Amino acid sequence: MESARCMADDFLNFTFCTLIFDFTERSRRMKVLLCEDVKKLGLLGDIVETSEGYARNYLLPQGLAKIATPQNVKAIAKEKEKRSEQRVRERSRLEEIAKAVQGAEAVIAAKANEQGILFGSVPSKQIAANLRSQNFEVADEVVQLPEHIKQVGTHQVTLKFADDLTATVNVVIVPEQTTAPETDGT
């Protein structure tokens, strides 16, 4: 009886120790050098600490990162400087676009009923296309709609060029003018 109880205690202790070991193995971290800009992680040339699984299963095989060694850091230093200058130029270009488009007005005609409710909605692509027709450099993904525009009237729409760079435009939705066919009285 005593030996059976001892064996059960040993098994429980072994299982508990194994669970603790497995938990610590899963939470291992790894430092990697980013070879590309990775959203929500870092920019090219940054040394970041990430989970070992994310690094080994995604970042390293995709060529997005290398193991952080002094040789790899030196090899990527020139590219990091070049990319940094490129980001500064792109940021200033986006700031100019945001300043130019701030307060602009996009007038869009859409089919609506007598109460002013649209048949469908106005997508962000249509707003971006309208702004591009006015010679503003606005990509489709920049237009941020909090909800679908489904009513005639003026709506405030945010253009998000970067996390901290936005502009606001007025989108005026007007009902499409449908001309009824003229009938001859003859």
Image (spheres, grey):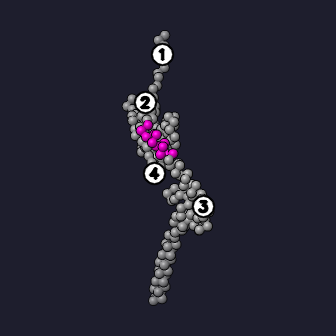
Badge number at residue 175: 2
Q: Is residue 27 visible from the viewing direction of this image?
A: yes
Dot 2 and dot 4 residues touching (CB under 8 Å): no
Is label 1 in a helix, a strand or a loop? loop
Instruction: Return the residue at label 3.
Output: 76
What's under tag 3, amino acid-wise?
A: Ile
Is label 2 in a helix, a strand or a loop? strand
10 Å neighbourhood of mark 3: few (<14), some, or many (≥20)? Answer: some
Instruction: Return the residue at label 4.
Output: 163
Label 3 – label 2 distance at C-alpha: 56 Å
Mark 1 vs 3, N-terminal side: 3
Residue 151, given in percent of the width and then of the height, sits at 40, 36
Label 4 – label 1 distance at C-alpha: 56 Å
Label 1 – label 3 distance at C-alpha: 75 Å
Q: Quadrant of residue 75?
A: bottom right
Q: Is residue 126 visible from the viewing direction of this image?
A: no
Question: What stretch of residues is rendered in magenta?
Answer: 93-104
Q: Nearer the viewer, mark 3 or mark 2?
A: 3
From the viewer's perspective, is 35 left or right of 24? right
Residue 33, given in percent of the width and then of the height, sits at 56, 63
Mark 2 vs 4, N-terminal side: 4
Q: Which residue lies furthest to the left in this view?
A: 115
